[in-house]
Amino acid sequence: MSEPMSAGKFQQVLVGAGLTVVGVGEWRTHNRNHKGPWGPVNGVMVHHTASRGSAATVRICRDGYAALPGPLCHGVITKDGHVHLVGYGRTNHAGGGDGDVLAAVIAEKALPPDNEHDVDGNRHFYGFECENLGDGDDPWPEVQLDAIARAAAAICRQHGWTERSVIGHREWQPGKIDPVGFTMAAMRERVRAHLK
């Protein structure tokens, strides 16, 4: 359990992980903090966007849409492995999820099945939306998978967390399927390797 990094520190740790980081507009102050608290933070959540085209994906994740205002994450990781920062603070990415999963993330233990919808995840997780259709056919380039792992590991290192603090949306909220196309167990192994 930690206080969130400042926006500047967040950017710094991502750049320090060897990532290409692109700030989009006034990302440092673009958030949903008026809807509730941001923090304490407990982990990193990975999503797929179910969209195609980097520019359109970044725009959607920054601005949101009528039913779900943006920002929809903190960073968008596009197919080329670039991390586009679209918001900082509370963002609309995690939604409600399972309190038992949150407890396991905090304890850094194996995750239980997500079968409840009783905790506000937007308060507790850094979120990365990753450009992919999520249909099981759209490929995940190695440079993108590596960027996801590097970004998650950089945040974990800063907060003193292990790879067990990195989860997929599908592990948090009943009914969610993302990310599709790789397993979170494999992604956590990548994160662990970077943390070494």
Image (cartoon, grey):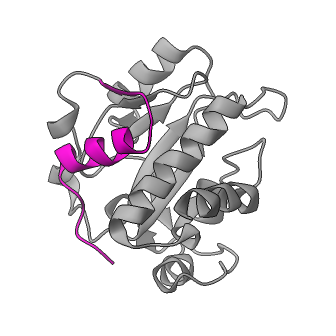
**Residue at screen point 47% across, 75% down:** 118
**Quarter placement of the N terminus:** bottom left
**Residue at screen point 23% across, 32% down:** 27
- Identify which residue, 193 or 135, lies in the foreground: 193
Q: Quadrant of residue 114?
A: bottom right
Q: Is residue 19 on the magenta stretch? A: yes
Drawn side of residue 151 relative to residue 134, left or right? left
**Residue at screen point 50% across, 86% down:** 107
Drawn side of residue 3 relative to residue 48, left or right? left
**Quarter placement of the C terminus:** bottom right
**Residue at screen point 54% across, 81% down:** 108
Say how many tags the image has: 0
Measuring from the top left, give residue 137's x and y in whole percent.
Answer: 84, 28
- Identify which residue, 130 or 93, lies in the foreground: 130
Residue at the farthest front position? 196
Drawn side of residue 62 relative to residue 31, left or right? right
Up-down: is 55 above or below 25?
above
Q: Is residue 5 on the magenta stretch? A: yes
Measuring from the top left, give residue 89's x and y in whole percent.
Answer: 24, 50
- Can residue 80 be seen here? yes
Up-down: is 58 above or below 15?
above
The range drawn in magenta is 1-23
Up-down: is 88 above or below 113?
above
- Can residue 74 be seen here? no
Q: Quadrant of residue 100?
A: bottom right
Residue at the farthest right position? 137
Measuring from the top left, give residue 91's x and y in whole percent.
Answer: 32, 47
Measuring from the top left, give residue 191's x and y in whole percent.
Answer: 60, 58
